[in-house]
Amino acid sequence: MVLLGCMGEARAEDGYALWMRYVPLEPALAADYHARLADVVAPDQTPTQRAAREELRRGLTGLTGSPPRMQADASQASLVLGTPQSSTLIAPFRAEIASLGDEGYLLRRTRMGGRDVVLVAARRDIGVLYGVFHLLRLLQTGASLDSLDVRESPRLRLRVLNHWDNLDGHVERGYAGRSLWEWQTLPEWRNPRYTDYARANASVGINGTVLNNVNASAQSLAPAYLDKAATLADIFRPYGIRVYLSARFSAPIELGGLDTADPLDPAVQRWWRDKARDIYARIPDFGGFLVKANSEGQPGPQDYGRSHADGANLLATALAPHGGVVMWRAFVYAHDVPADRATQAYAEFAGLDGAFLPNVILQVKNGPIDFQPREPFHPLFGAMPRTPLMMEVQITKEYLGFATHLVYLGPLYEEVLRADTRGDRGGATVAQALSGMAGVANVGADASWSGSHFDQANWYAFGRLAWDPQNAARAIAADWAAMTFAPDPEVVQPIVGMMMASREAAVNYMTPLGLHHLMARGHHYGPGPWVDGGPRADWTSVYYHRADRAGIGFDRTDRGSNAVGQYAPGVAAMYGDLARVPEPLLLWFHHVPWDHRMASGRTLWNELVGRYSQGVSQVQAMQATWDSLQGRVDRQRYAQVAAFLRIQRREAQWWRDASVAYFQSVSGLPLPAGEAAPPHPLAWYEALQFPSAPGDGR
Amino acid sequence: MVLLGCMGEARAEDGYALWMRYVPLEPALAADYHARLADVVAPDQTPTQRAAREELRRGLTGLTGSPPRMQADASQASLVLGTPQSSTLIAPFRAEIASLGDEGYLLRRTRMGGRDVVLVAARRDIGVLYGVFHLLRLLQTGASLDSLDVRESPRLRLRVLNHWDNLDGHVERGYAGRSLWEWQTLPEWRNPRYTDYARANASVGINGTVLNNVNASAQSLAPAYLDKAATLADIFRPYGIRVYLSARFSAPIELGGLDTADPLDPAVQRWWRDKARDIYARIPDFGGFLVKANSEGQPGPQDYGRSHADGANLLATALAPHGGVVMWRAFVYAHDVPADRATQAYAEFAGLDGAFLPNVILQVKNGPIDFQPREPFHPLFGAMPRTPLMMEVQITKEYLGFATHLVYLGPLYEEVLRADTRGDRGGATVAQALSGMAGVANVGADASWSGSHFDQANWYAFGRLAWDPQNAARAIAADWAAMTFAPDPEVVQPIVGMMMASREAAVNYMTPLGLHHLMARGHHYGPGPWVDGGPRADWTSVYYHRADRAGIGFDRTDRGSNAVGQYAPGVAAMYGDLARVPEPLLLWFHHVPWDHRMASGRTLWNELVGRYSQGVSQVQAMQATWDSLQGRVDRQRYAQVAAFLRIQRREAQWWRDASVAYFQSVSGLPLPAGEAAPPHPLAWYEALQFPSAPGDGR
């Protein structure tokens, strides 16, 4: 009868289960957990309470091989879930959990009525659900419960996915199939996948989702689509996830028939007020709007001579009575190409600090350009003390090889969260400046959600770091690997090794030493350091690398664009000083002669070529590690990862060869000893075209 | 340990397994089959032999609960597979299977060495595989094997899916997610789904697949894409499936850098010859090209003053040395809007009969317009005796409510295959005129393959009817329902009832009585009988329905466009005579006064309104039938079908109301007694916009 519940053998490990596979633990451990936890006392009066019970049932059944016994009788309890309101067993802990906030929880082994008991206690139901996921993570990773005593509450209030999903199902910069949202069959059809999406998010504490692309269609705010969004909100609500929508600033014109979207126009203000009321009638806990305005062709308040604050406050006023927020993106740049694109968002927004209503949050990308393999932290994180800030990162890998390159982003997120905004080691980190994090989602309708098995780790790591930016990328990787593959050190350690090295590998074979924005035009697939011309200088590669016969790099010191001047003095002094700037950011901030002597003793030119080759070697090392895991990982996932690593190896070599060919054509220097010449002339690389590369904007 | 192989409970019945679920039969039957079939003697020397063994192993294990024993020793055999070459047990049947052709097979219960044995015998390995699928179908439907004696061979040589898949993953007129073909990760990653696709096709005898859209990109013929296609061909080959490509006629310009694609130009001829050689070097059994030329903006031979025969023969000459064919589409229409679009393909091609090389096959749509809910058969099927013809049908439901409407197309295919091209009951059916069938695929990356569970039946029925056009749509539906849901008459009968009524329901609520092409512009989602204006008259609705105050319908008699004159005299006489034309085609061929008396005794106007309402009632009846199956169908599929029926019900009502509102505005007549007025004024329906409706061409 096994087959009855188990169609499609070939898909058994297709990645759909994510890190919530709940496969049987080794027998002794399973028996121990079962003995400790099998008698569950848990409330079931609310949807969230039922979600927690159901997750526990699913997890314990899978992990221990036996379903837990759901007890009504408190004297039978070995595992107790609840809040002071929902459980008389938890009520005595009211004081102890008072400081945990609305989303926190306590996990504790204790004695109760003479029995050894594990508690999952929280002030609200959602905290209990989060606690259940935490407990299940401990079991999945084989942790001891002997001295269990965990108090957790999120450090950031807003932990939000941004879906760049169009209403026609295309996902901009998506590499995991079509949009998860099946608009055509909503609201009637509630795909069970929506619930699994909510479970996955809740398991890492993500508490919001923006359903539609920041390059928004006004249609998303039309009644038919609001009804569809409301159905999703109903499905997500038990999992603590609020729905948000990207709002097109000109919607009062397109949907409302007005002749202006001027934020100071009373009719426009009324339109947004009415629209907010319509939305909240359908979605009482609607989160609010995300807005991309006056950027890359999107409409915005500047079309009417108004400021970003005028625009944001217009929407904030409409949402405020209902408790909604406006997440206003700082990723804007002027129609006129500036001297340095990196300075633009700061120039636009730093002066508006204090001008926003309290329910406006400014959403700032992690770096001042655009989700590059490495950027310095965005200067706005140190510059807007009176404005709530969110950090926007990409989980999807637009500039990092798409889904086929194994690049674990935990170290990237960690690097920027821990960056010191004052440069005085006084603890003023980027993380300290944040009220939330937004991650541009990498999930779609692909069986594996993320288009690759390893990209699931980036979704996971985003959630864990948004919950607590002090989490360590390496520890997160270890948890993920244990849950996703197997809680066996001989599996986890090599996988964590691959993951932790992977981001540096990509930096090396794409954009070493602070180079950036060298990808092919438009789709960003593959190398394009030669990209020049076109509509805007700041959409080219040569604008950013500025290589010439003498040297390479963007002079952002006070002798150049003075982008360093947007940082606090301690930071500016470091970045602006050729002797002190960290080598990984060297060419971001400095134009440097080819014969500049690097820490390694090599010239810059030799170092640059060496880094490109090192990137390829690092991918080969990942392949060797993965090969060693054959037989320890199920066949289907093993095969896909191996195939994707072959693609990454081929493309890393392409990146290295094309980049070396190009930069050599500029520097005119010979390759360092031992470095192979690119197999094709530069023109061959330049001629490659990929009109159907995935994920392009349309 | 059940869970180990069985992640994602929620997806257990997500439709991925199609009609090859192989779930356990009821115990007595399972035991009987096991007793009869468990000792298998089957060759395993070729990929196709191994595919047959593996399918048998998978099927018998699932259906009977026990794996078969693969025996080397002939004296142990109870089930014997093979060809005279591959099996000494089958060799004695050489003469008996000589007439079955390369794809046929014999299934027989017989005695062998004193044992009761079932044979699956064929001349070639692929016949054995087809025979295994036939045998498994018998088991899945609970058939008796007592007097098993089946001889099958396909009546049509070419049984081909046409994928309208673009290289960027968008599927034109696709309602089942992105393209199955993951071009970005080919050739490295061989998604196991490709093999399951091949299994599904082989199970119904489909032996070819055109990978890319007829609105083709020349890139499909570039080396990088040929390498990817070759990998798919390698995966499909063991299942008897050849790969074909849609060829863009101007590829010699776009890829080859020539300044012409003139079929009489020697450089063009050389380019195609070289291209064919490149392809066959990668894909030795490449099937050939499908071409849409000089139609809807596609390039073609007429751009150079040459004929369709010149164009087709150019490619046929290039392919002939390698054994490939050209499938040349007859769906062309002139840039100048004709008096009657229905006459255009005939006008273009009938005179070319005999002008094509032998390896050209003309691919003709089932009807003279474009995959409408009902059309008369295409007049070319009776007009080109010297030209091999394929019939092209849509499996995807561009004009039939997309994936969300339950419309079983078996009756539509059957109706046209059985149509009498001479009108003399002499057996000259459309099926007799065919060398093959092409089905525009309805599959994509959705878990369910087809975007809905019931649309799987259309893929299935296409294959079964292409194998043998004399198969009955009802029997095919019964087989499908038994395999897909359960071999239980209390499940099968109601489902077959729904399926067999469903196409008439759609005709009624969309385009009753011979009306056609009334869908909204472009995406064809929902009603648009008012569509007028725009670039071409024959892209409007009013062009086709010609409704006015006096009456409705397109006069295609000899007093009108004389489209009837393209049919044989016996057919023309029937269609052209208002007294003899079948009522389902009335308004296709005649402009009829509103007060025309119908067979029912009602006036045409009253009949028309009545049919619209009847369509809605028929959907309600399907809902009631489905409701009665609750508990007999697994929860997930039950829920999705129920949700989709709710959508269909809502949209059928919308079709009825909008159409009645529109036609009443033209006829000026009162609604028949008992007919409800549309709830909105006509302008409301006309104003609805669906810019993100799926599947649109781009």
Image (spheres, coloured by chain):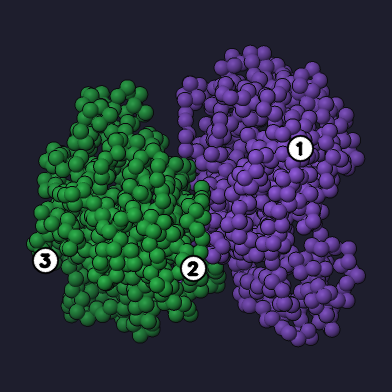
Chain colours: A purple, B green
Q: Estimate the spatial distance between the alpha carbons at disc 1 and disc 2, rounded to whole Å.
A: 44 Å
Across and down, in percent, residue A75 comes to 79, 86
Mark 2 lies on a secondary structure that is: helix
Disc 1 residue crowd, few under 14, some 14–19, many 20+, Cα 10 Å: many
From the image, state whether disc 3 or disc 1 is nearer to you: 1
Across and down, in percent, residue A470 comes to 80, 50
One can see residue B403 in this view: no
Where on the picture, by quarter, is residue A261? top right
Across and down, in percent, residue B224 comes to 41, 36
One can see residue A225 in this view: yes
Q: In this rendering, do the residues under marks 1 and 2 share a single chain?
A: no
The numbered disc on residue B96 is: 3
Contact (Cβ within 8 Å) of mark 1 with mark 2: no
**Which residue is nearer to you in this view: A322 or B175?**
A322
Query: Does B24 sit above or below residue B235?
Result: below
The residue that appears at 46% across and 66% down in the rendered structure is B677
Chain letter of mark 2 equals B
Q: Amino acid at mark 3?
A: Glu
Q: Amino acid at mark 2?
A: Arg
Chain letter of mark 3 equals B
The numbered disc on residue B646 is: 2
Query: Does B480 sit above or below residue A171?
Result: below
Where on the picture, by quarter, is residue B274? top left
Upstream in sequence: badge 2 or badge 3: 3
Query: Does B138 sit above or below residue A340?
Result: below
**Horizontal arrangement in the rendering, residue A92 relative to residue A583 (left or right):** right
The numbered disc on residue A308 is: 1
Across and down, in percent, residue B160 comes to 28, 52
**Which residue is nearer to you in this view: A187 or B375?**
B375
